[in-house]
């Protein structure tokens, strides 16, 4: 059964509302994305394995849990995935980073790959694929397909917003990959944009048009 985690924490929802506003500046949009990605990192790593290490508190020794950051690979789906990356890395600074470059053919909405680079030994690592907008699901599915070729230990997908059609398309191809999102919006429009959505995430992040 495909799993979708909707992160309905009030702080996440508050910041998402601010991001949706059309008159928000590039600077403010980027800062909110950064803050949201830190909050979402918390949720997406909730069931990550920990190991016990020996430490000394000021009073005595103990065995205490840590995560092995090096085993986590954030995979940024360019270009908007970059907006998620910095905040996630702030929470898990030892994580490795992969990149998948995809653009949507504006006519067919099909994802076309132009770049792919991943860390080695993926079989020892957990991949967390980042793309703020899961719209048609074509780019998300194509990115996950490529990441799967590297045989990571596990894969999760994180988006800020998802469209119901995109989730269905994505999970038809990858029922084994859980999706973490802050909102499932109403629908896609005829150009593949999410409604009500927040517009073009890449353009709003980078101040392009
Ligand atoms: N990509 C975006 O940036 N926004 C959408 O609404 C859909 C895809």
Image (cartoon, rainbow, N blue to C red):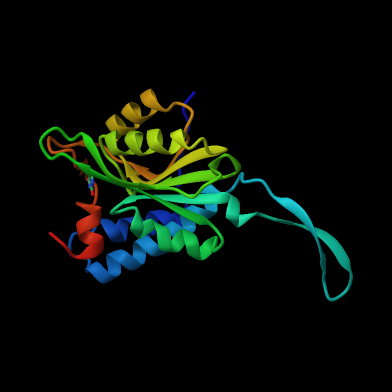
Query: Quadrant where the C terminus lies?
Result: bottom left
How many numbered circles does the render carry?
0
Residue found at the far left of this picture: 107
In the picture, measured across the screen, residue 139 lies left or right of residue 155, that is left
Residue 51 sits above or below residue 168 on the image? below
**Which residue shows up at 85% across the image and 62% down it?**
62
Which residue does the image show at 37% across and 46% down from the upper left?
159
Residue in the image at 24% along x and 47% along y = 197
Outermost residue toward the right? 60
Furthest residue toward bottom: 58
- The answer to whether 46 appears left or right of 177 in the picture is right
Residue 30 lies in quadrant: bottom left
Residue pictured at 28% horizontal, 30% vertical = 165
Residue 184 lies, in percent from the top left, at: 34, 39
Q: Position of residue 18 (x, y in %)?
A: 30, 61
Residue 181 position in % (x across, y down)? 40, 44
Picture quadrant where residue 35 is located: bottom left
Q: Position of residue 93 (x, y in %)?
A: 54, 64
Within the image, what quadrant is residue 122 found in?
A: top right
Q: Is residue 18 or residue 61 the one in the foreground? A: 61
Q: Nearer the viewer, residue 195 or 128?
A: 128
């Amino acid at each position: 059964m495909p799993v979708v985690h909707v992160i309905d924490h009030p702080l996440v929802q508050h910041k998402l509302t601010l991001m949706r506003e059309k008159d928000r500046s590039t600077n403010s949009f980027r800062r909110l994305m950064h803050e949201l990605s830190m909050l979402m990192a918390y949720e997406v790593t909730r069931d990550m394995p920990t190991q016990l290490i020996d430490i000394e508190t000021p009073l005595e020794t103990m065995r205490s849990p840590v995560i092995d950051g090096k085993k986590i690979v954030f995979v940024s789906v360019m270009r908007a995935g970059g907006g998620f990356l910095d905040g996630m890395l702030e929470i898990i600074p030892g994580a490795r980073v992969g990149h998948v470059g995809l653009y949507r053919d504006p006519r067919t909405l099909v994802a076309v790959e132009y770049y792919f680079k991943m860390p080695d030994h993926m079989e020892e690592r957990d991949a967390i694929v980042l793309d703020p907008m899961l719209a048609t699901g074509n780019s998300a599915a194509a990115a996950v397909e490529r990441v799967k070729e590297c045989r990571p230990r596990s894969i999760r997908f994180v988006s800020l917003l998802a469209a119901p059609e995109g989730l269905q398309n994505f999970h038809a191809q990858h029922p084994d990959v859980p999706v973490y999102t802050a909102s499932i919006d109403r629908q896609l429009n005829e150009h593949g944009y999410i409604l009500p959505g927040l517009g073009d995430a890449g353009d709003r992040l980078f101040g392009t048009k």
